[in-house]
Image (cartoon, rainbow, N blue to C red):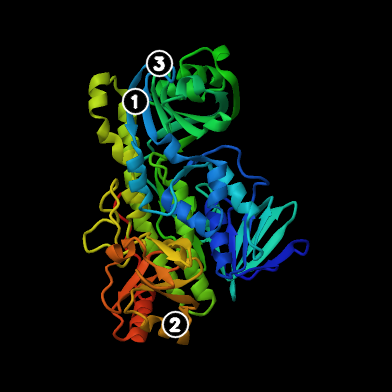
């Protein structure tokens, strides 16, 4: 980072904030929301005047929907998209209007849906990235601001933090304590602050065609999130964006050198590619209209470090890591990065924790991103091999369960941990989620009754730390009355019982999953992960030790060999 303190241009608007975020995509906007909810003044600088019209990411998993629930926008996101349970199938066919080869049900029955609903207060949804961005912008709180149409050109160090100089119709200079780089894969500021990019071998180039059409003649009765197409002309996937509005994304990888020219040349007829994918002529596809086309290289990238040497700049989302879309973890991982980082920045800025707490951000989040990258790469290679072969339809159908971990990943979504044991992975089972209230895990969901209202345990940490305890843990309420803050953030204590006022565990789910003994309490962080299980013998000392453990959690582990 440049260390000289430069005088800003006179014509530029001068803005002060606690945190400046470079990039107004889902990660940057989510960071602004999470920080603002914790009382941190935040400014987002975004070069685009409006959100991109291209859908890019489409699936919002249940963990990310929980975070959007905290922001109060989950209902709007669900209305703007399509509930995944309505399209919880993956279909393989020759063409959309051709022969169906196989189908994989993610939620096969009402009973399966109920089993999935036990894990979270919300279900996944299909809602395109550009719609999520628009909703997050529209609902920004007062202490968060987005400045559009400006390009962050320079990031310099100041005695108290950072200065970002942005050009555009409204030149802007932002002075802040910290900066979050959420500038995406192609952002230019990372290198200037010493954050060097790494990359694995690219897995190929793809063509995306975003279009509208009435495809109900071929989708009704087999509504699917994805339709994998194995025609003689086009081998790729038709992605559901919004079937109610007839909105789709056709994604075609170049499987051979010849297909580089076929799909990316100037003379490519994108309408003909859509016709080949559907398997009918254009006049048979009602309302066909192409909105946008892009091509891009699929692969995984990362950074050698997610934090600048002086500690003032941290990367998140695609600025820190990218991986193939096969699994749908890109946007979800970025928003969850922001959630992890926001409370730590707030704790430091509010004086409740030392700056070293911010080192735990990369220590916790990078292993999760690396796991998601490896899994997405495995999925991509598996599907590429499938598209390149002429599998026997009967054999293909018999072996369809082999593909489940690509599409059914509840264990990966909810079951990752920030505190794996020695030699243990951050995700033990991609498909199956097993709730755990142990340190490092997301505090499991359980429905509770509060004066007739149903709330989730995941709702108890929206703006601070929460102590969850049973009938014998009233000592924690006394502790909180005397010290209602922890690491500079609000601390609450919830006594959860089966048969008396306050929070009631009417189903027994909380008692079963959390398995609290005596005065024991589970201390849950503002990002919903368990910080510690505290015996309740010396509560104040136990809280102090819990804070010390995360603040002094040690150096960031070395990057996994061969991974971003």
Residue 497 figure quarter: bottom left
Task: Between residue 336 and residue 463, name the one nearer to us.
Answer: 463
Q: Earlier in the sequence, mark 1 or mark 3?
A: 3
Q: Residues within 10 Å of mark 1 (few under 14, many from 20)?
A: many
Q: Which residue is mark 3?
A: 98
> Mark number for residue 387?
1
Task: Between residue 4 and residue 136, name the one nearer to us.
Answer: 136
- The residues tagged by marks 1 and 3 sit, at their Cα atoms, a distance apart of 16 Å
Task: Between residue 284 and residue 515, name the one nearer to us.
Answer: 515
> Mark number for residue 24?
none
Q: Earlier in the sequence, mark 3 or mark 2?
A: 3
**Residue 545 drawn above or below residue 560:** below
- The residues tagged by marks 3 and 2 sit, at their Cα atoms, a distance apart of 64 Å
Q: Nearer the viewer, mark 3 or mark 2?
A: 2
Q: Residue drawn 57% across and 12% down? A: 283
Q: Nearer the viewer, mark 1 or mark 2?
A: 2
- The residues tagged by marks 1 and 2 sit, at their Cα atoms, a distance apart of 58 Å
The x, y position of residue 150, in whole percent, is: 68, 53
């Amino acid at each position: 980072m440049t260390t000289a303190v430069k005088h800003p241009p006179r014509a530029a608007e001068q803005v002060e904030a606690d945190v400046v975020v470079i990039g107004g995509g889902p990660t940057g906007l989510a960071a602004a929301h999470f920080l603002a909810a914790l009382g941190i003044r935040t400014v987002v600088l975004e070069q685009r005047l409006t959100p991109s019209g291209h859908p890019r990411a489409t699936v919002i998993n249940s963990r990310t929907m929980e975070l959007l629930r905290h922001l109060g926008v989950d209902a709007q996101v669900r209305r703007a998209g399509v509930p995944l349970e309505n399209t919880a199938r993956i279909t393989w066919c020759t063409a959309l209007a051709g022969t169906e080869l196989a189908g994989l049900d993610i939620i096969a029955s009402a009973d399966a849906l109920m089993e999935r609903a036990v894990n979270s207060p919300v279900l996944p949804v299909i809602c395109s990235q550009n719609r999520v961005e628009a909703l997050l912008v529209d609902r920004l709180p007062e202490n968060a601001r987005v400045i559009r149409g400006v390009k962050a050109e320079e990031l310099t160090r100041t005695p108290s933090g950072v200065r970002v100089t942005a050009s555009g119709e409204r030149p802007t200079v932002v002075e802040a304590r910290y900066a979050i780089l959420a500038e995406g894969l192609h952002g230019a500021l990372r290198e200037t602050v010493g954050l060097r990019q790494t990359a694995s071998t690219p897995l190929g180039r793809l063509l995306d065609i975003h279009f509208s059409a009435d495809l109900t003649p071929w989708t009704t009765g087999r509504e699917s999130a994805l339709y994998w197409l194995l025609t003689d002309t086009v081998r790729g996937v038709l992605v559901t964006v919004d079937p109610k509005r007839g909105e789709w994304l056709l994604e075609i990888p170049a499987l051979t050198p010849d297909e580089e020219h076929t799909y990316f040349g100037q003379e490519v007829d994108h309408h003909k590619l859509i016709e080949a994918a559907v398997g009918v002529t254009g006049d048979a596809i009602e309302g066909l209209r192409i909105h946008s086309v892009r091509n891009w290289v699929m692969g995984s990238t990362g950074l050698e470090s997610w934090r600048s040497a002086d500690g003032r700049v941290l990367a998140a989302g695609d600025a820190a890591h990218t991986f193939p879309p096969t699994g749908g973890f890109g946007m979800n991982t970025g928003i969850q990065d922001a959630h992890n980082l926001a409370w730590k920045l707030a704790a430091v800025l509010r004086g409740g924790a030392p700056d070293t707490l911010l080192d735990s951000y990369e220590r916790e989040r990078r292993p999760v991103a690396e796991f998601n990258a490896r899994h997405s790469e495995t999925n991509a290679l598996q599907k590429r091999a499938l598209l390149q072969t002429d599998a026997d339809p009967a054999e293909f159908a018999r072996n369809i369960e082999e593909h489940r971990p690509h599409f059914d990943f509840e264990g990966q979504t909810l079951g990752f941990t920030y505190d794996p044991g020695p030699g243990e992975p951050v995700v033990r089972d991609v498909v199956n989620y097993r709730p755990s209230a142990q340190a490092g895990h997301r505090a499991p969901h359980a429905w509770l009754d509060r004066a007739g209202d149903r709330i989730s345990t995941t709702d108890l940490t929206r703006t601070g730390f929460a102590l969850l305890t049973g009938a014998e843990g009233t000592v924690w309420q006394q502790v909180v009355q005397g010290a209602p803050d922890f690491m500079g953030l609000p601390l609450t204590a919830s006594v959860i019982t089966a048969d008396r006022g306050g929070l009631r565990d009417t189903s027994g789910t909380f008692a079963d999953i959390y398995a609290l003994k005596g005065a024991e309490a589970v201390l849950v962080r503002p990002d919903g992960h368990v910080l510690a299980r505290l015996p309740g013998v010396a509560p104040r000392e136990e809280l102090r030790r819990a804070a010390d453990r995360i603040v002094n959690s040690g150096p960031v582990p070395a990057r996994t060999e061969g991974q971003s």
